[in-house]
Amino acid sequence: MNDTTRDPRQVVEVLSEALPYIQRFSGKTVVVKYGGNAMTEDPLIDSFARDIVLMKEVGINPVVVHGGGPQIGELLGKLNIESRFVNGMRITDAETMDVVEMVLGGLVNKGIVNLINQCGGKAIGLTGKDGGQIRARQLQVEQQTPDMAASEIIDIGHVGEVESISTDLIEMLAARDFIPVIAPIGVDESGRSYNINADLVAGKVAEALDAEKLMLLTNVAGLMNTEGEVMTGLSTAQVDAMIADGTIHGGMLPKIRCALDAVKGGVASAHIVDGRVAHATLLEIFTNAGVGTLITDAASTSGVPADTPAD
């Protein structure tokens, strides 16, 4: 629908609905993990950049943490470097890590910065190595097959986990109205670089900043119940129970654990957001319905469908 056919009354209603949310979250920090379809489809890329700029304009302090797995794989293929995975994680030797840094810290990061700036924002691109923001350590991966008496440690190279986060640089940039855009590359005390899961980095950054919200853009509608409805308004206790009974499993489990850990670590709320929906971040923050699963540390009823106001 273009501007000539849109009912002006609908526009006013949307703005009116957003007002209390703008008032509530003005001055707060929102950490957004950017990835999936939202990062590869042109209409979604544009809507994401506009969303981030609008958030900043109404007084919210967005911090973007991005992934880039498909782009890394594409460049590795062009360079005839084989991609190998263990438990879904890319084995990252020194040569592969060089490519990871080029793609995440260069191509992808600067592309996001440029898009936000083109929409009128003031974005600054960083990696976790800048200012020593992300102190990392090597991720220990265990693997066990049925014929093995005990698990073995698999060395997957420069794949890391977060040891600590320094927020000085992020807070300085946000205070000067810049939008930090962070590539998930960390460094250990010896200067060795590590590629870290972007969801994990976003969660730890949100905790360190005492953020109001952590938003994880993904390629699914959210966490589903047995009837196939998206659940929202979940408490951490409910999510723990669903992990324990196997309701949450498979590929969704790491993302949910990340959101759960962030809320338990002090973030007011975490959102699993459908990044396939245009303007998903604004819809989740500024409307009653939202477009994903909301997790908080507050008591909840039973995991209400996503069209029920829960924020």
Image: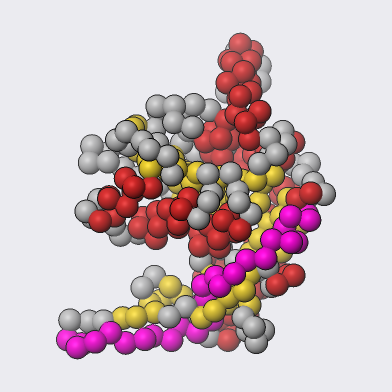
- Is residue 114 in sight in this rendering? no
Please tell me which residue is depicted at 63% across the width and 77% down the height of the picture: 187
Q: Is residue 65 shown above or below 190? A: above
What segment carries the magenta color?
147-173
Q: Is residue 291 shown above or below 20? A: below
Q: Is residue 8 shown above or below 90? A: above
Please tell me which residue is depicted at 66% across the width and 51% down the height of the picture: 63
Q: Is residue 227 left or right of residue 63?
A: left
Q: Is residue 109 left or right of residue 287?
A: right
164 in the magenta segment: yes
Please tell me which residue is depicted at 44% across the width and 43% down the height of the picture: 296
6 in the magenta segment: no
Q: Is residue 169 left or right of residue 68?
A: right
Percent position of residue 133, x then y: 68, 68
Number of on-image labels:
0
Q: Is residue 140 shown above or below 6? A: below
Residue at the right extreme?
Answer: 176
Query: Which quadrant holds residue 253?
Result: bottom left
Percent position of residue 8, x then y: 64, 13
Percent position of residue 67, x then y: 56, 61
Q: Quadrant of the N terminus?
A: top right
- Is residue 287 in sight in this rendering? yes
Q: Is residue 197 left or right of residue 58?
A: left
Residue at the left extreme?
Answer: 147
Query: Which quadrant holds residue 252?
Result: bottom left
Of 163 and 276, the residue lying toward us: 163
